[in-house]
Amino acid sequence: MQRYFGNIQDGFAYLSEDDQFHVVKVMRGKVNDQIEVVSDEKLFLCDIISLKPLKIRVEKEISTNVELTNDVVLIVSLLKGEKMDLVIQKATELGVEEIVLLKAERSIAKINKVDEEVKLNRYRRIAKEAAEQSKRIRIPLIYQVIDFNQLDKINADVKMIAYEGMAGTSANFKNKINKIKKGERLAVMIGPEGGFSPKEVEIASENGYRKISLGRRILRAETACFYALSVIAYTLELN
């Protein structure tokens, strides 16, 4: 069943124009078809009662428990091409609460102030679609591009930076996740294609980020994101 993010008022669901088009034209919705609508992190089963204009009536609220027990923030260096789109999509599917884009010395991809909001809006659309596809009730927050002197903007109780200089056992990574307490907010930082510079690692350490290893092999930046978030989600859901 298709899921959308919208607003619930007086027993009816209201969707954006894009989502209305998707219901009617793309999904070829019909009267009496049912869809799911998320509003204020609550899930509702709804019926289509009219197409012209589109009217969606709330049938009932549905209990759901799909989000991670702890908020996870992915701080990812800007990546080139479609890699960034893929990271946004998969990070959303893996349950992150927030995605922060980081300017790093060795980032091949660049973003200027003129293009920043356009790209952020694109990433938000990707996150919304991925949240709907993965049946989440939250869309990850994507609202800023920062550099290393702005790391203090990130709110987290546990902070980690994946550093290729630590390549080896990933035991310290798993141990840190196992020690996370209920309600603590976790941030994990992943570097660009060329890795973090020693100066960047030093700045991160000064801001409370502890170096971790993601295993014996050196991973591509996007693979490192998927690996780290998969281990985090798996471990949190076991605990």
Image (tube, grey):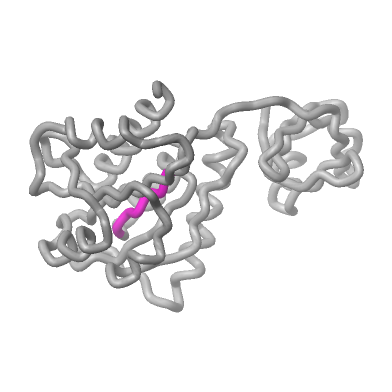
Q: Quadrant of the C terminus?
A: top left
Instruction: Name the residue: 26% across, 56% down.
Output: 208
**Image quadrant where residue 225 sits:** top left
Instruction: Name the residue: 18% across, 48% down.
Output: 211
Q: Quadrant of the N terminus?
A: top right
> In the image shown, does 137 or 149 lie closer to the viewer?
149
Point out the stretch of residues depicted in magenta.
Answer: 72-77
- The prevailing secondary structure element of the residues shown in magenta is strand
How many numbered discs, if any? Answer: 0
Instruction: Name the residue: 86% across, 26% down.
Output: 32
The picture places residue 54, in percent across and down from the top left corner, at 86, 43
Work out which residue is located at the far bottom of the displayed protein and give it.
114
> In the figure, is residue 156 to the left or right of 33?
left
Q: Is residue 16 visible?
A: yes
The picture places residue 63, in percent across and down from the top left corner, at 70, 25
Q: Is residue 107 visible?
A: no
Instruction: Name the residue: 34% across, 70% down.
Output: 150
> In the figure, is residue 217 to the left or right of 74?
left
Can you say whether 89 is above or below 239 in the image?
below
> In the figure, is residue 204 to the left or right of 8?
left
Residue 138: say if magenta. no
The picture places residue 189, in percent across and down from the top left corner, at 29, 51
> In the figure, is residue 117 to the left or right of 48?
left
The picture places residue 188, in percent across and down from the top left corner, at 31, 47
